[in-house]
Amino acid sequence: MIQRTAHCEETMDYELYYWPGFPGRGEFIRLALEAGDADYIDIGNASPEGAEAVVALLQGGQDGHPHFAPPLLKAGGLTLSHVANILFWLGPRLNLVPDDDESRQWANGLQLTVTDFTAEVHDLHHPLGPSLYYEEQKAEARRRADAFIDARLPRFLHYFEQALTHNAKNGDYLVGRRLSYVDLSLFHMVQGLRYALPNAMAASEASVPRVIALHDSVRELPLIDEYLTSERRLPFGETGIFRHYPALDMA
Amino acid sequence: MIQRTAHCEETMDYELYYWPGFPGRGEFIRLALEAGDADYIDIGNASPEGAEAVVALLQGGQDGHPHFAPPLLKAGGLTLSHVANILFWLGPRLNLVPDDDESRQWANGLQLTVTDFTAEVHDLHHPLGPSLYYEEQKAEARRRADAFIDARLPRFLHYFEQALTHNAKNGDYLVGRRLSYVDLSLFHMVQGLRYALPNAMAASEASVPRVIALHDSVRELPLIDEYLTSERRLPFGETGIFRHYPALDMA
């Protein structure tokens, strides 16, 4: 019998590639990896060369595919981009979605509504698009924020309230009988909106009790609690999707 | 032996639910159904009650799931929403994507970049969001269009050019060796942008020859040619994503 001497190289199952220093769209992936107790490394934040590694992978990884924007997830030979696409793939692997096709497609549809919601929250401070700074579009941002708070914020929140009501026969989750990655993403929307628009959210929450109850139950999950109180959780700030500009909130 | 007398009811494999009268986001689904030679009915345009049927299905179909916005696709007992989600599901059924998981995830990532591109084109005329009319945001639209034409239009077009270059060893398509639903969607982006921003597109096309060649080859597909010259193809206008407001185009 030959005794093998292995060079033990530490390899992670998953590598997340996202810009360092702020939660951004990477956070939807981090929450799934954390709640799924996955073995992963957050490349962007793991070393001073993190951002360069993100840029390099955008230009093409092992499979050579170019990607438009992070977050990216590397798993084995595969590199995936777009939050909903990554979560669609990760969901069954982390036991964060029922594994039948119908549930997966329903979860994906809900996640794509989260994507749209996220884009509209981003455009609060970037109504003229991502190629100009907020400071170049403050007047327009004020008008967009009014319209968002009046019409779009309630519309999105009530949609998720309706989806939770529809699924209430199964439990307090969006999809089926257990926690899914979509619940984690909706939790993050509530967290981010409370940071960005505290007055508007304070005025809205009473009308969407199921959304808030889901947020609260995700907040108490042991793995999520451990994550949120760790150094891996990056603070909100003036970069990324959720920014607290008091001029944009309700008076 | 008992002879069965069947009441022959004509049933379609697929029902598309989208607002009547304009191409909108429904067009990405129509193009796949047409290129895949699918047996489908466009419910929104099939009768004067089409729009009511769309509203009713948004509130919950057979499975009861509420949906945020059309397009919706009904197939058997399933109701799906969001363009990319519908195409992910339809793709293998219409032979419009390779059927391995890796290709499907790559196609889905590309389609989600089309989704983002579409949203930015829409926001050209709605920089303050979808809850106000264009006429209420014309000045902001002019600024957003400038930024889009300067920075975002070339960025998106060059990204797809890069993806086509990457795949050129396999053929003139975005995914693998054959036509996929993502090619049809990119074709539609070129068609829509030529309508909405003819000057900006005239100035851009020479720098993205593979994108234009793909557009031209899709245009010549017999099933697509038949569709585009049929009454089923709805004209662009002042509703939906692609609108020709000369004030927003390059001078």
Image (tube, coloured by chain):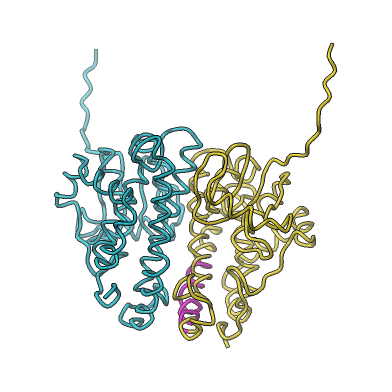
Chain colours: A cyan, B yellow
Residue A114 highlighted magenta (yes or no): no
Q: Is residue B150 above or below residue A181?
A: below
Viewer-closest of A161 and A137: A161
Counting the numbered discs, the total is: 0
Q: Is residue A230 above or below residue B23?
A: above
Instruction: Identify the residue at the far bottom of this view.
Output: B251
Q: Quadrant of the N terminus of chain A?
A: top left
Any part of residue B187 in sight = yes
Q: Which residues are magenta?
A: B143-158
Q: Where is residue B38 shown, x and y percent of the image? A: 71, 45
Q: Quadrant of the C terminus of chain A?
A: bottom left
Any part of residue B172 in sight = no
Q: Where is residue A24 shown, x and y percent of the image? A: 30, 60
Viewer-closest of B193 and B204: B193
The residue under the point 58% across, 47% down is B176
Q: Main secondary structure of the magenta part?
A: helix
Is residue A79 toward the left or the right of residue B218 in the image? left
The residue under the point 57% across, 51% down is B169
Q: Where is residue A10 shown, x and y percent of the image? A: 22, 38
Residue B146 highlighted magenta (yes or no): yes
Is residue B22 toward the left or the right of residue B169 in the image? right
Viewer-closest of A46 and B15: B15
The quarter of the displayed image where residue B210 is located: bottom right
Q: Is residue B221 above or below residue A146?
A: above
Q: Where is residue B187 shown, x and y percent of the image? A: 64, 62
Is residue B108 toward the left or the right of residue A128 in the image? right
Q: Is residue A69 above or below residue B60?
A: below
The quarter of the displayed image where residue A93 is located: top left
The quarter of the displayed image where residue A176 is located: top left
